[in-house]
Image (cartoon, grey):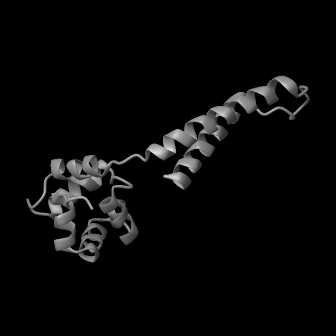
Amino acid sequence: MTEATKFEQWVKQYGVQNLVDALRKRGMEYAVTYSAVYQWLRGEHEPRPKKIRALADISAGAITVQDIHDHFQARAVVSPFSFSVCGPLCAFFLYLCSLRERLLPVRSGMRVGSEKMSVLALNIGVWLYALLA
């Protein structure tokens, strides 16, 4: 297990429920769910800059914006498995898409544009990364 960051220690001391309530009191643009805070703690998602500043304000000097950024730097972990599998799978899917573009006859509405196929391949890559990471 990794050592707790200053941000993580502060959130645990302040309390997730208290933090969610404090952000909600600041207005709807600051509202978050309990799940979002736990995702922040795990480093899965980083709050937007406006919320980062609000977190630093709520802490009343206990943590700084830099402490919050340091937390996400420390938690940023990429699974080597995801790159070893997803990259080649996406490349293979793009190759199949290019074959489809060349081999299928062009009829009205039959061929999907290559930019749409690229977006689809990217979405599949993101999905595979989420699944395998």
Residue 129, image x and y in percent?
Answer: 53, 48
Tell whether 89 sits left or right of 68: right
User: For the point 18% across and 50% down, which residue is it?
Assistant: 65
Residue 57, image x and y in percent?
Answer: 15, 59
User: For the point 15% across and 59% down, which residue is it?
Assistant: 6
User: For the point 25% across and 53% down, which residue is it?
Assistant: 52
Quarter holding the N terminus is bottom left
Q: Quadrant of residue 104?
A: top right
Q: Of 97 and 85, which appears nearest the observer?
A: 85
Q: Quadrant of residue 125?
A: top right
* Name of the residue lying farthest toward the left: 61
Q: Of 95 and 69, which appears nearest the observer?
A: 95
Is residue 74 visible to the viewer in this orientation of the structure?
yes
Tell whether 58 sits left or right of 99: left
Q: Of 79 and 69, which appears nearest the observer?
A: 79
Residue 43, image x and y in percent?
Answer: 33, 55
Is residue 113 visible to the viewer in this orientation of the structure?
no
Q: Looking at the picture, does residue 33 appear above or below residue 75?
A: below
Task: Please give the count of numbered marks on the rendered protein.
Answer: 0
Tell whether 67 sits left or right of 83: left
Residue 69, image x and y in percent?
Answer: 23, 48
User: For the point 27% across and 67% down, which residue is it?
Assistant: 23
* Name of the residue lying farthest toward the top: 102
Q: Of 109 and 127, which appears nearest the observer?
A: 127
